[in-house]
Image (spheres, helix red, strand yellow):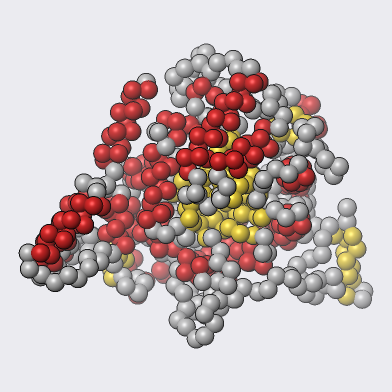
Amino acid sequence: SQHLFEKAEFYGECKSVCPLNPDWSCYTPSPTVAPTFAPTEARDPYMTLRDAASNMSTPLPFGCVINYAFIDNPAKVNDHTEEDLELYLALAAKQYNWLTEENGCKWRYSWQHDRYRCVYMLEFAESHGMDFRGHALVWGKAASNPDFFDEECVEPLPGRCKSVVPDYTVDQKYKIMKDHVKNESEFYAGRLAAWDVVNEAVCDCWLSFSSCEEFVAANPDKCGKSDRYSGDEYDVYLKKNIYWPDMPDYIGVAFTETKKYDTTASLGYNEYKFEASTGWQKEKSDMTYQLIKSLVNEGVPIDYVGSQTHIDLGYMTYETGGGSTSTDFPSDISYLESVKANMDRYAAIGVDWHFTELTIALETTEDDFDATAEANQAFLYKGLLDLCLAETKCTSFQTWGFVDGWTNAYNGLKAYPFDTNYKGKQSFVEMMSSMDPVYEKTYNPSCSVESFGKCSVDADCCESGESCFKKNDHYSQCRPSCPDNADWDCYTGIETIFSGSPTEIAAAGAALLVTVFGGAFALKQLVADCMKTGGDEDEIDLTSADSNAMFFRNHNAFEDEAREKEKEKE
């Protein structure tokens, strides 16, 4: 499977693909035109990921993920406060043009909460001009499905289950899946940019086995060979679950059914630990490629393959097994070169590539996030983004979260472009420089620290339009305005929220009250009434932080209704 590539007249190596380096005679520059920006005349640099990505000649969907559970109760993770939540949400709206709800659109949560969590985040995205990805429509993981389709809901019932799953016939399973796909895709039709239609179906053939065939022989209850999706190049082994093997074509059927009811969303297959085409990921990478190729050959309406890309700093040494627990599967090329080779073969069969859940973490919580670690993280973030920018078929770049300390899965692993003080790390700077050649590539490590209270020592860390506000000797934040909270040194009373003439204050007060109680029509009427009392007709301009705060406090009635429905179900 290797070829001889020459670097110089007296030097050559056997490799699976040509190295990504112009020093090698086989190297050919990407046929993709380098990213350009509009307008091309002299301009100020863009200052956010969103602006840089949106103003390229071919705009790039640049996204993040938010978990509604932390909005409902920010103290669930690292004892965050409502003030932290306000900053977190404002940062998401400011930096990203694409959004996914982490769990709320999955079947179990949609069923439990009458779609409330998914709809809530979709409305947040729409209110901030962000596109939205649905995740995930069909997933064989038992705990992601409702009790009546959760194969693990058997006696004795697990804590999450309230009823026993029936013993369905194959025809009944097909009907249940098709009904679910119809219900969800029809409900959201026209509002989603993308759907992760099927999630994580390919078998994990653990590194302690030399092949999937050997793994399945030892674990026949976990996976099996799919005759339908295996092909002339590679065999495909799928996970056994409530769908497969009873429904051998369930993956293709899920896509076809989704397309019936939502003709505008891009439809994709989402998978993990397959993005590198060589090394220890090779076998799963080949199986995933064969699966997608078989779907394309069948005429299944699949638009993209979603690469989760949950990696750690060990991938810097991928050639010797970095990122895994085994050194028995070396790679003859680097991780980034291996990902590029995989992206190329999907482009060749006309399938887009989405980075859907990117995280680049420390290997353990005991590791120091020192200057070397931060530089390596930035190298990998920038490297993957550069691959995406160089490939016209790479049409989405999304991280699974965006701020350190706001996720349980990667808590303490410093996996994101923004630190716990909501400031961009070196990864942010490097990605900005990749997307905007005018961006001034400067990085001040003192502005990316773990300790709160930093801006009270160095106010220069605050961005344009922000000032440093101090809460106490150990806590301060860069913000557009003083928080509406007497705990903060800057708080002086209601005039910190409403300033201006009495008429302007009355109008803004009416707007706030009506926003809290819902109802855009009532807001419009009350503001109009206030204006009639003798003031000018200036528009009320709420800052994005204020808008976020109002948006996320305007859900009590909706939430109470959802909880009542949940009680009725029980």
Name the residue at 76% across, 41% down.
Answer: 298
User: Can you say whether 443 is above or below 146 in the image?
Assistant: below
Q: Between residue 362 and residue 267, name the one nearer to us.
A: 267
The residue shown at (80%, 57%) is: 332
The residue at the point 58 percent across, 72 percent down is 57
The answer, for residue 391, to whether it is visible in the render is: yes
Give the left or right position of residue 206, taking residue 463 as reference.
Answer: right
Residue 527 place in picture, x, y as percent: 16, 60
Residue 200 x/y as whole percent: 63, 39
Q: Position of residue 189 (x, y in %)?
A: 50, 45
Q: Residue furthest right?
A: 10
- Viewer-closest of 469 and 355: 355
Using the image as rendered, state which of residue 516 and residue 327 is in the foreground: 516
Q: Quadrant of residue 452?
A: bottom left
Residue 9 location, x and y as percent? 92, 76
Q: Is residue 334 above or below residue 102?
A: below
